[in-house]
Image (spheres, rainbow, N blue to C red):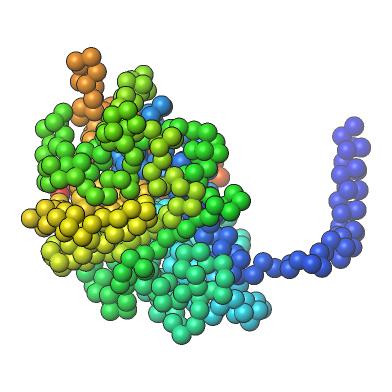
Amino acid sequence: MKSILKYLMMGAVALTTAACQDLEDINVDPNNQAEVPSHMLMCGAEKYIMDVVYDNWFSGRQCLLYAQYWSQRNYTEEDRYQIRESTNNSYFGYLYRGVANLNKVIELNTDAATAATNSAYGANCNQIAAARILKAWTLLLITDTWGDVPYADISQLEDGVLNCRYDDQATIYASLLADLAEAVGMIDESKEAFSSGDIIYGGDASKWKRFGNSLRCRIAIHTSKVDPQWKSHIAAAIESGVFESNDDAAGFKYSTSGTDYTQFYYGTYVSGRNDFTIAKPFADILKGQPDTLNAKSHPWEGVEDPRLPAFTTANASTGLCNGFAYGTPTSLSSAARTGTPNWYYYPPCHLDADFTVPLMTFAELKFIMSEYKGYDADEYKAGVEASLDYWSQLAGYAISDAARADYIDKVSASVDAEAVALQKYIDLYINGTEAWTELRRTGYPEQLLRPGEVTMVYNGTPVAFEPLSEVKGDIIARVKYPTDESSLNGVNWADAVARLTDGTNNYYSKMFYDVRTSTYDHPANK
């Protein structure tokens, strides 16, 4: 029997080999291009990456929970750091697939055999630069999630390097800054980046340049506690040209056409899931309420944030915006839901089918500028104003000039590290990984719940936030490396794990920029 199978297999291989060329000649569609043009690849890459990042899994059940913007209202395991390994495996691969798509755009505009053809869709240099900028944005998100990750080797996958080494995170950061500086330097602002297909900036090369430089500022500020040269990177980016207004903000606007709606909309209304609502720590910050359960003050107590209607709707019965107690046991989720907003029936703007997901805002840049200048009050106020305008416009309502001025005045009485960090945290809504990074870097907001602190009182008994994974008494520091990597890339995976705290694949090994000595430590900038 085995012999028969052997010869049948040999015959099949021979037939395939002999017929291969004939099939290639026959299987050609004269109405479609054999090579996908670069502008279509860029369009697909942008949407693919946005779909992966801004959805109810990577964002909803991960980084938006870690930043305590959202709580799960039914099953709270992920709120308490119990991560689904299948999800972790999938999204690690998905994000690198997005990077590979961007590498293809770069290749098509670099290779002499294809560059001339693809120049019809935008200047080659600008297409390359835009792809490199979005690639840097994606790789920053990857390293800020897992730590040391494959970086240098990933561009060689098509050249036979199938087992990528894990690069040191500090080295990755230095490479990202250098790559962005090179990318913005190659942009020709007199020519378009893409003739079509670019959803983020509509092919505007100048806006891509300002985004690339602003992203350099984001990366540099992450290193402010560990690198004495961090200010030099920001100075160089400013000189090259950064965001100038809300019009420059990087955002991907979805569509109501067909199925081109956001993944937040898909995960809620197409999948029919009513899983999320605003977390109590975030709601309390916006309402100007102190955390009385844990004796935490509020720097602007009694001041309600004008952006509150952009981030959540109210409870239909009470008219109040009481947040869901973060990190409650699933057994108490029903009790915790009482009186909280029901986003499924009363959706805030992020559940609009055509919501614009923000990659980076002008306000974030202004808060970076404030910190860069020693917590400058003018830059800070400009950031608050820009954020008020950005979010109210995105949500489709107006803030009066008087209300805007009154709020800015009240939150500017003392402009310091906490004020800048807290306003930046508010503006970073939806960008959960970046908010989580800032929490790990600065120790702010203090109003967010730490393990062991009281999340709610049930029947007169305090209920603590108890993580389901070991995080050493702090917020989660990183996501574990995927188990798939241990089998598919075992040697490099083992080497990366050996460099972690305790030499184990854990949730408490800190990022290189996190030098806090305790959960409420606020290290000074270098």
Q: Is residue 490 above or below residue 133?
A: above
Q: Residue at x 33, y 66 (%)?
A: 246
Q: Quadrant of residue 457?
A: top left
Q: Residue at x 59, y 76 (%)?
A: 121
Q: Residue at x 32, y 32 (%)?
A: 315
Residue 243 screen position, x and y as percent: 32, 70
Q: Nearer the viewer, residue 406 or 366?
A: 406
Residue 189 screen position, x and y as percent: 44, 82
Give the side of residue 217 with respect to residue 505, left or right.
left
Q: Quadrant of residue 170?
A: bottom left
Q: Nearer the viewer, residue 183 or 16?
A: 183
Residue 405 visible = yes
Q: Nearer the viewer, residue 410 or 152?
A: 410
Q: Quadrant of residue 292?
A: top left
Give the side of residue 388 with respect to residue 101, left or right.
left
Q: Residue at x 82, y 64 (%)?
A: 28
